[in-house]
Amino acid sequence: MPDTNTVFSNASALADYADKTARLVPGLHDLQTMAALLVAEHAPESANVLVIGAGGGMELKALAEANSQWRFVGVDPSQPMLDLAAAALGALADRVQLHHGYTDTAPTGPFDAATCLLTMHFVPVEERKSTLMDIHRRLKPGAPFVMAHLSFPQGPEEREVWLSRYVAFAVASGVDAENARKAATAIGSTLPLLGPEREEQLLEEAGFANVRLFYAGMAFRGWVARA
């Protein structure tokens, strides 16, 4: 697993983070819109929302723009990424509390909703369930949780097919082919990826109910569940 504090402390990586991410994640902006809509289904108009992996600020900004009365706690272990989030939020920052750390050190809430986009695939497999449990215990009963990240079938042959599709999408989006292949190799060899079925099992084991797939974009999957 890559050290996210190192990866996201590189100045050049931070500078083009948003553009690069949009080239790698199919329908990124629509994914953020869908997350806001799914939160709004069950959260109150003045919801307090927990955002796990808030560095960079894209998710926070999209959610804050979707509802002018929501307030947020954004959690991330990388201080440079939180600094980038603060800059990206601009005037919206007065509705956001940024927390430097991990889920287990985040404010206890209870929160009306939580999101975790493009983050859980960095969490080691042995810590995945406890991280989901930390999120669950910070939510009010019935609160929505929206999660999306890299997840595809993990059989050897299927892994190669999905990683090749990751490369194909990146190249079609304007990423240099060699860089896309290197990224896919790093993903396949270092990230603790799980198949969609196991992701859904872990959500249920952590206490979530009504787990439903709402997004599938090449190698990425997204689920909505209730606490």
Image (cartoon, rainbow, N blue to C red):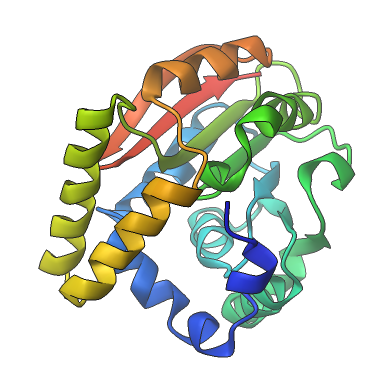
Q: Position of residue 156 (x, y in %)?
A: 27, 29
The quarter of the picture where residue 181 lies is: bottom left
- Report whether residue 140 is seen: yes
Q: Is residue 3 left or right of residue 105?
A: left
Identify the residue shown where x is 70% and y is 78%: 80
The quarter of the picture where residue 160 lies is: top left
Identify the residue shown where x is 38% and y is 42%: 34
Identify the residue shown where x is 58% and y is 41%: 115
- Report whether residue 29 is seen: no
> 35 or 27: which is nearer to us?
27
Q: Position of residue 223 (x, y in %)?
A: 44, 28
Q: Is residue 146 left or right of residue 80?
A: left
Rendered position, 84 above or below 28: below
> 180 or 72: which is nearer to us?
180
The quarter of the picture where residue 18 lies is: bottom left
Rendered position, 129 above or below 114: above
Q: Position of residue 61 (x, y in %)?
A: 54, 65
Q: Position of residue 216 (x, y in %)?
A: 27, 35
Identify the residue shown where x is 16% and y is 48%: 165
> 40 or 26: which is nearer to us?
26
Rendered position, 64 above or below 194: below
